[in-house]
Image: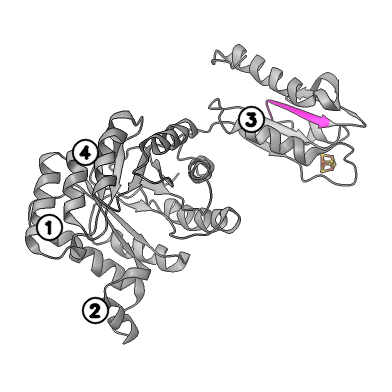
Amino acid sequence: MIERRKTRRINIGKVPIGDGAPISVQSMTKTDTRDVGATIAQIRRLAEAGCDIIRCAVPDDKAAGALRYICAESPLPVIADIHFSYKLALLSLESGVQGLRLNPGNLDKPEEIRSVALAALEKRVPIRIGVNAGSLSKGWRDKVHAGECTTPEAMVESAMGHIRLLEEHGFDLIKLALKASDILTTVEAYRLMSGRCDYPFHVGITEAGTSRSGIIKSSIGIGTLLLEGLGDTIRVSLTTDPSEEVYTGIRILQVLGLREAGPELISCPTCGRVEIDLMSLAERVERYLSTEKTPIKVAVMGCVVNGPGEAREADVGIAGGKNQGVVFRKGQIVRRVAEKDLFNALVQEIERIKMERGYLTRL
Ligand code: SF4
């Protein structure tokens, strides 16, 4: 059982974060925010994939203005991602965003910080302070180079400086992120930070890479932190379609027992006994299950000799034979079908089980 760090609670729209709330999954749109139609379409797809909160880049006034229409249509609470411009933060708040991502220390003047803090406080909109190892201020970089502190220490102290700038104005709806592209630096920074404040943590490994290496990096980094009880909302950063980020985030939570399990796919690695195109079949089943919410264990096995027995704990499964295969439930064969019909037969069996258990079916 994972014991989670005790934190304060903030709310991004209707999504609670911290103080024992379910760990939420975030993503970021990869469309041009000024293109309202494309951005809304992508947000809808991500909501369908299970995303809880969405963030949009705000590079200019036009993007901040577009957020008004995006927020009105979005099925998910929207966070505006702001860098260096208090005006864009104020415009985004006027557009109705439910969260800001902004480092107050990067604004030019104390009045700018004050106006953003007061406007956000009035609307009860939280601000995420996000410190990246790669973009520490020159002062902190020099200290690291001089050996006066480590990078994680510099990240934590930098974050504490940003926090104080908001707290001076009575603003405490804060969420923190301390990201680096390497896992050890990230994990150490969050560990150090956990002893310094009780604001909730947004965790992730930044610039983790393409899906192949990024999923490994993110799973280990985010997984390590979550196992230590550190993390109240997560974002997997991948150089690919954002629905892959959401899928990976949800799976990380599920395998750690931090989110109710949806479907689980078991598939054998195949060996010299397999006589059907199992890899394509397993990928097709995985795609089918990716939008399924029902907790059901599905097995895709290569051969009849060992398959059903090896996957006895699965609710339902298929196992290949020569030009044909079987459908089995809890290790017992229930049907024999031609190879070309195996996928459809499995889907029918999944839907039958859902009906028996009282879930909505897709048929
Ligand atoms: Fe090989 Fe059959 Fe086991 Fe798959 S289920 S690994 S094909 S023995």
Ligand 1, what quadrant? Answer: top right
Q: Residues within 10 Å of mark 3 (few under 14, many from 20)?
A: few
Q: CA distance from mark 3 to mark 2?
A: 51 Å
> Which of the marked residues, 3 or 2, is nearer the chain's N terminus?
2
Magenta stretch bounds? 314-319
Pinpoint residue 38: horizontal percent, then vertical percent: 42, 37
Q: Residues within 10 Å of mark 1 (few under 14, many from 20)?
A: many
Task: Give the amino acid at mark 3.
Answer: Tyr
Pinpoint residue 161: horizontal percent, then vertical percent: 18, 66
> Which of the marked residues, 3 or 1, is nearer the chain's N terminus?
1
Q: CA distance from mark 1 to mark 2?
A: 20 Å
| Residue 250 within the magenta-colored segment of the rendering | no
* Badge 2 residue CB within 8 Å of ligand 1: no
Residue topped by disc 1: 113
Task: Give the amino acid at mark 1.
Answer: Ile
Residue topped by disc 2: 139
What is the quadrant of the N terminus in the image?
top left
Of residues 41 and 81, the one drawn nearer to the viewer in this rendering: 41
